[in-house]
Amino acid sequence: MEHTEVLVHPVERPMDMVAGNVVGRVVGRVVGRVVDGVADGAGHPGETTPPDPLARLRAAAEARRAAGLGRALRPRTPDHDGLLDLASNDYLGLSRDERLVEAAVRAARAWGTGSTGSRLVTGTTTLHADLEDRLRGFTGAARALVFSSGYLANLAAVATLGAGGLVVSDAGNHASLIDGCRLSRARVAVTPHKDADAVDKALAGRAEEHALVVTDAVFSVEGDLAPLRELHEVAVRHGALLLVDEAHSLGVVGERGQGAVHAAGLAGHPSVVITVTLSKALGSQGGGVLAAPEVVDTLVDAGRAFIFDTGLAPSSAAAALAALDIVSDHPDLPGQARRHASLLARAAEERGLPATTPAAAVVPVVLGPPEAALGAAAVFAEHGVRAGCFRPPSVPPGLSCLRLTARANLGSDDLAVIGRALTAVAEMKVTV
Ligand SMILES: Cc1ncc(COP(=O)(O)O)c(C=O)c1O
């Protein structure tokens, strides 16, 4: 089957399909007007005016704004514009920690500001090797390979390991995993959210020799945990690899933050491939793959997103190493982040807002239409709190939400302010 036919996840639809095709229809009308204008004789007699290649982009942007789906970049100040940060993924509050900053500065002085080349040419330093060793030890994996971002780690792992086989992908997976599916050119079976039986059926019915099951550990918006033991049992029974994206669980889930795979007792299992980001709980920037030697060797030899990308900046590697030191010295940090997430969810529920007990630090409060989520984010800002606001295509239509992220370093004053903001949102009375 053509990969383009099968690779649109139910939650990841092209922008022109969002909001019941409204955007597509409006774009058609607006582009039609522009093109009609050209056909109607703008320009000199006898001259043909070529179509404006940007017209459809302007029309699509106009349609997205009309549907409440426009987006804007808002540069912030170092202190988050004076707002309490409840939108970043800085789960352990380490991104501004002096120990990370100092380590990054020292690395930049020693190695320069960039890694200067692909990991395979000049982009591997002793810092990269140290970081790989530490990540491997922390998660209990056999080998590690670091990337310049978590997005690229997912692209490389899914595209390379999935190629020529079947990829079974959870409907709630992150965009970077979905894009890895697309890039793999494999046949992709999208299974309902957290449905191990559906994964079992997809694997049992396959004609392909090899298969890869792909899932987030903690889903990036819903904040819930994948059934890792069940998925692993199914994958092993069918001779498939299980790839688990620990972007939201490394440093947060498990007694000492070693991640959801470790907590499920699957650390170091040869059929498990872990991907991570260094840019959330570890407060740095970059990504990694933790897996059996055969997997890492394959990515070094054939992972295009690894080979053709400039290696992780030395300062980012050094900051991630410093973060791993802190997490090892303060094993209470992951538990604090999780406890604060539970307090946020309970505070929302007590005010009649839908929130479920979170598996990690992500607490979504579903409000329904995009306008309700935008309105709630504005109410939070009025109360001095910056909250994430998620709308289609980041979430399915009708499930726009506030995405609150707990941090280990929230204080009781912070929690009181957040409580007041939640009360004001509950009084908006705009829910699903
Ligand atoms: C689940 C998940 N995987 C991967 C990534 C990508 O990681 P990075 O930001 O390091 O590219 C993200 C980041 O938003 C994510 O949420």
Image (spheres, rainbow, N blue to C red):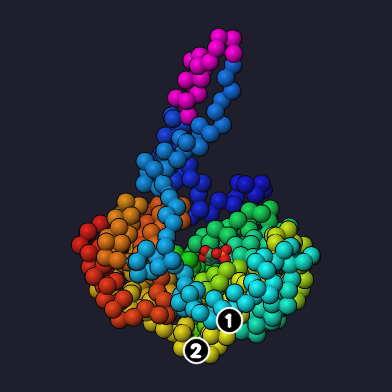
- The CA span between labels 2 and 1 is 12 Å
**Image position, residue 405 (x, y; %):** 41, 70
Residue 281 falls inside the magenta stretch: no
Q: Quadrant of residue 33?
A: top left
The residue carrying pointer 1 sits among few (fewer than 14), some (14 to 19) or many (20 or more) residues within 10 Å by Cα, namely many
Residue at disc 2, CB closer than 8 Å to ligand 1: no
The image's mark for residue 330 is 2
Decide if residue 239 is on the left or right side of residue 351.
right
What residue do we see at 30% from left, 76% from top? 415
> Could you tell me the amino acid type at mark 1?
Ala
Q: Is residue 39 magenta?
A: yes
For the residue pair 303 and 225, the one nearer the viewer reads as 303
Tell me, yes or no, whether the two marked residues, 2 and 1, touch with CB atoms within 8 Å: no
Residue identified by numbered label 1: 322
Q: For numbered disc 1, what is the local secondary structure?
A: helix
Closer to the camera, 210 or 172?
172
Q: Quadrant of the C terminus?
A: bottom left
Q: Seen in the image, is 170 located left or right of residue 290?
A: left
Q: Which residues are magenta?
A: 31-47
The spot of residue 266 in percent (x, y) is 61, 82
Q: Residue at x 47, y 69 (%)?
A: 89
Residue 386 appears in which quarter of the rendering? bottom left
Ligand number 1: quarter of image: bottom right
Relative depth, front residue between 313 and 244: 313
The type of residue carrying mark 2 is His
